[in-house]
Image (spheres, rainbow, N blue to C red):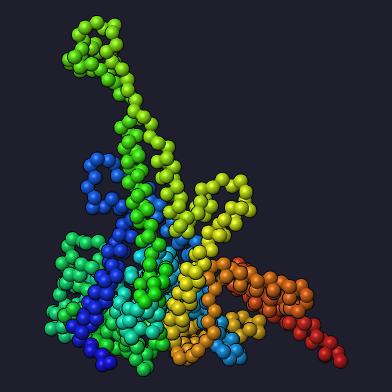
Amino acid sequence: MQFDPAPAAIWRKFERDRDYKRSIGLYDRVRRNEAFYLGRQWEGLKVQTLDPLIFNVLRRCVNLFVSMLVSDDVAVHAQPFDMDEKGRQTAHVLERAFASAIERSGIKALGRPLLKNACVDGDACFYIHFDPALETGQAVKGDIAAELIDSTNICFGNPASDEVQRQPYLIIAMRRDVDEVRTEAKANGMGADECAAIVPDDTSDYLRYRLNGENDRVTVLLHMRRTETGIAFCKTTRTATVMREKELPYRYYPVTHLCWNRVRGSCHGESPLTEAIPNQIAINKLYSMYVQCIKQVAFPKIIYDMTRFPNGWSNDVGKAVGMRGNPNEAIATAFKAPDISSQVLGLLKQMMSDTAELMGASEAALGTVKPDNTSAIVAVQNATAAPLELTKMEFYRFIEDWARIFLDMMGAHYGTRTVVVSDGTGEEPVRQSFDFSTLAGQDMRLQVDVGAASYWSETMQTMTNDHLLESGVITDPLIYLENVPDYQVRGKNDLLHALRMQRQQQKEENANANQPQTEQQ
């Protein structure tokens, strides 16, 4: 189908996706789930007969899920299929480049809000792009950057599928200041008429919460589509073009998508909070009524004869109380209402525990059980974590996706940069130039270790080197240290340099010692 770059045509695609989101109730569901997670669980209700109490079971469960899944330990290893001397050097360069790009982009720290958004909203996205203004510590500027995208701001060309790389097109909606967008349009070579056509608009469904003073913002649509030679990008508003379409030699869409619970036939996932919100409402109502009833009937009340105390009863200390008739007669008594049934509190506790367990957070996982039997508690914790294994595998797949996008962007944008490489012969690493454009279009073996897997692989590699050293297979300490991961030995480079200097001195001493013997012969 022929692509129409006109702003009105792209806006129609955006409106069509918004209609789909409204049809599945995404906007209302996201707002409601977010409000309940934040504790705004009585929002919009006018309650005068009782004090609204909040016992937020949902937030505790969400925080537990995020803490069990998130990992700041991500190790990426990319290797060419041809592992000759040049291939080993390329693998070493890519390992250093990945570590630097991951650290500079802060994508590991973005994993925490991403998982929280996916758990609360049902799904979340990363948009990865190349920022030419980032400092790299070299003469060449620019590096990879990542942004967190809400599920309400990503538009899929095929809303029946959640596979990003199979989409005919993608649209990312952004809410930005009008002056900022006009400045960008002018920098992209747009004329004065196009800049003047960038005017504020109002998209009420775009925002989770309505904000006052939204008269100076405009919705910018970043449209991307796949072509025969790469990915084409353009930016538009409802009435103007901000950036004309330009093509970049990407192999993948620079977007990664994570669904918490997949929904068949939909690009958006389902949140575990959605089905638990009625339980949370019932808990709040029952607890509020329980406390209100205690306040009303827990304390005894004085009952007196109004015909004998025409001026009323007073509980003030030392104050005389006037009455009519004989004061020795029983004229006042204390009354205590019947106690509340214990079934109410039992039901509340049962509802809270059942809601947490049905969501996947047992008492052992939350740490609310007495540690009488450690083995049993560990077994229950492992059983509780089992349902999250599917989500964990999906999160690991998500990390592999953005790692491939990183590799794709390195080949497209890095160009020639200075790197520190080692030839694997035990000599001191040297700084040399490496042309990353040679990576463009290459297929590589990509291994991504996440969380405990990264620790496991590094620990196993060190243990294997120890066994090889003890068995005599490795006799050179330089070779041993070269094979040990950098993070396992503090000051590894300094130690390697000292060993090389020591070996060089030994060679010179041996040469000087052999020289007199040669002259005598």
Which residue lies at the image location 65% right of the left edge and 71% below the top edge? 460
Q: Is residue 422 placed above or below 399 in the rendered structure?
A: below
Residue in the picture at 40% in, 36% down: 341
Residue 141: give x, y in percent of width and height: 39, 80
* 44 left or right of 55 in image: left
Q: Residue 415 occupies which quadrant of the picture? A: bottom left
Question: In this orientation, which residue lies closer to the viewer: 205 or 47?
Answer: 47
Residue 17 shown left or right of residue 501 in the figure: left
Residue at far right of view? 521
**Quadrant showing the N terminus:** bottom left
Q: Is residue 90 visible?
A: no
Observer-nearest residue: 39 or 199?
A: 39
Q: Indicate left or right for 229 with 431 as reference.
A: left
Which quadrant, please, contains the C terminus?
A: bottom right
Q: Looking at the picture, how far across and down is residue 16, in whole percent?
A: 24, 78
Height in image: 276 above or below 176? above
| Residue drawn at (59%, 68%) of the image | 455
Give the mark count.
0
Residue under the image location 49 percent in, 87 percent down: 434
Where in the figure is residue 272, as x and y percent of width and height?
40, 62
Residue 319: x percent and y percent?
25, 13
User: In this rendering, is residue 224 above or below 207?
Assistant: below
Q: Judge left or right: residue 513 versus residue 363.
A: right
Q: Residue 505 versus residue 125: which sits nearer the camera?
A: 125
Residue 468 shows in this picture:
yes
